[in-house]
Image (spheres, rainbow, N blue to C red):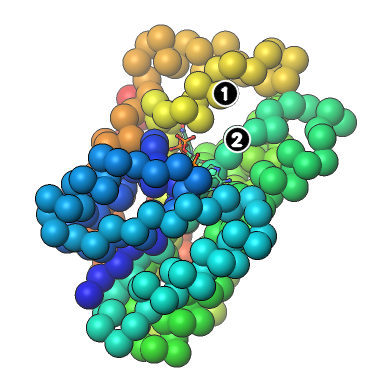
Amino acid sequence: MQYAIVTGASRGLGEAVAHQLIEKNVNIIAVSRSENEKLKKKAEERKVDYYHLSCDLSDPAQLEDGLDRIVDIAFHDDTHYVYVVNNAGVIEPIDTIGNFASADVQKHVQVNLTAPILIINRCIKEANQKDINTFVINITSGAAERPVHGWSTYSSTKAAINRFTETLALEQEGNGHKILAYSPGVMDTDMQGEIRSASEDEFADVDKFKQMKEEGKLRSPDEVAAVLMDLINQPDEIENGKVYKLYDLVGKK
Ligand SMILES: NC(=O)c1ccc[n+]([C@@H]2O[C@H](COP(=O)([O-])OP(=O)(O)OC[C@H]3O[C@@H](n4cnc5c(N)ncnc54)[C@H](OP(=O)(O)O)[C@@H]3O)[C@@H](O)[C@H]2O)c1
C-alpha cells in the first residue's frame, strides 16, 4: 500500500497535490485544522482510503498526537511507500522587525519549520525501522533565497527548511528515500490574498503583488501541483536534497 501524508490539504496547493495523488491511487492522510469535503468525496469515488487528521500544527501537543496517528495509519506491514508532503505554511506575521507580537512569531516558526522537522523525524525513524521507502517533499519559497522587506520570519523559516532538506538528503544517502524541496512560484491562493492585504509600511512590495494578480501572473494550484507530480513520477531523475523551482521547470508566466 502507498500513503501520502499531506499537510495543509484543506485548500490551496495542498488540496491540489492531494487530489492528484488520489488520482495515482495513493491513500491520503490530510493534516489541517479544517476538513475538505471534495477530497473526501473524490477518495470515495476512486476507492482510495482518506483520513483527515484535524490538527493545529502550531500546537506541540496536537502535533505529537497527530504524529502517533500518522504512524498507526501509514507505517505498517502492508505499506511499501510513503509520500511526506510538508506543505502547510503561513506567511503571517507580515511586518518589519521590531513590530512582532511574540505569540505570532512562535506560531509561525512552529507551523513552517518545527512541524515539518518533527514530521520528517518521526517518518524517517519509522520508515528505516520498517524498511519502507519514502518520498519527502518540502514546500519552500523563492523568499528563502533573498531578504524580502516585511517577510523576515517567512524568508527565514523557508531558508531553514531548504537547509534541513539538504541535510536530510546527506544523512539518508543510500537508504532508498527521495528527498526534495519544491519552490512553487506565485500561486492564486488564500496566502496571496493575505499578502495583498498588507499595508505598504508592513510590506514594501505590496503593490507589485497586487499588480501580478491584476495581470494574471499567478498560477493555479492545480497547474503548480501538476509540475510537482511530473517530478514525483520520475523518482530516478531526482537529485536528493535539491530545491526544484517551478520557474526553472516551466518558466515564469
Ligand atoms: N501562494 C503562494 O504564492 C506561495 C508561494 C511560494 C510558496 N508557497 C508555499 O506553498 C505552501 C502552500 O501555500 P498556499 O498558498 O496553498 O497556502 P494557503 O492557501 O494559505 O493554505 C495553507 C494551508 O496550510 C494549512 N495550515 C495553515 N496553518 C495551519 C496550522 N496551524 N495547522 C495546520 N494546518 C495549517 C491550512 O489549513 P487549515 O487552515 O485548514 O488548518 C491550509 O490548508 C506553503 O508552504 C507556502 O509557504 C506559497
Within 8 Å: ligand 1 and the Cβ of disc 1?
yes
Q: Which mark is residue 91?
A: 2
Which residue ends up furthest to the right in the rendered image?
Answer: 98
Query: Dot 1: what SS?
Result: helix
Q: Is residue 171 visible?
A: yes
Q: Is residue 8 above or below residue 3?
A: above
Evaluate if marks 2 and 1 touch, with contact meaning CB atoms under 8 Å apart. yes
Q: Picture coordinates of residue 32 (x, y %)? A: 47, 48
Q: Picture coordinates of residue 26 (x, y %)? A: 23, 62
- Crowding around mark 1 (Cα neighbors within 10 Å: few <14, some 14 to 19, many 20+) is some
Picture quadrant of residue 201: top right
Q: Picture coordinates of residue 205 (x, y %)? A: 62, 18
Q: Is residue 3 above or below residue 183?
A: below
Query: Dot 2: what SS?
Result: loop
In the rendered structure, which disc, 2 or 1, sits on the residue that comes first in sequence? 2
User: Relative to 57, is 152 on the left or the right?
Assistant: right
Q: Read off the residue under disc 1.
A: 195
User: Relative to 43, is 74 on the left or the right?
Assistant: right
Question: Which residue is at 29% across, 74% downward?
Answer: 81
Question: Which residue is at 52% across, 68% downward?
Answer: 67
Question: Which residue is at 64% across, 18% downward?
Answer: 198
Q: Amino acid at mark 1?
A: Ile
Q: Is residue 159 above or below residue 252?
A: below
Q: Is residue 246 visible?
A: no
Question: Which residue is at 87% across, 31% downward?
Answer: 98
Q: Nearer the viewer, residue 252 or 15?
A: 15
Q: Nearer the viewer, residue 215 or 136?
A: 136
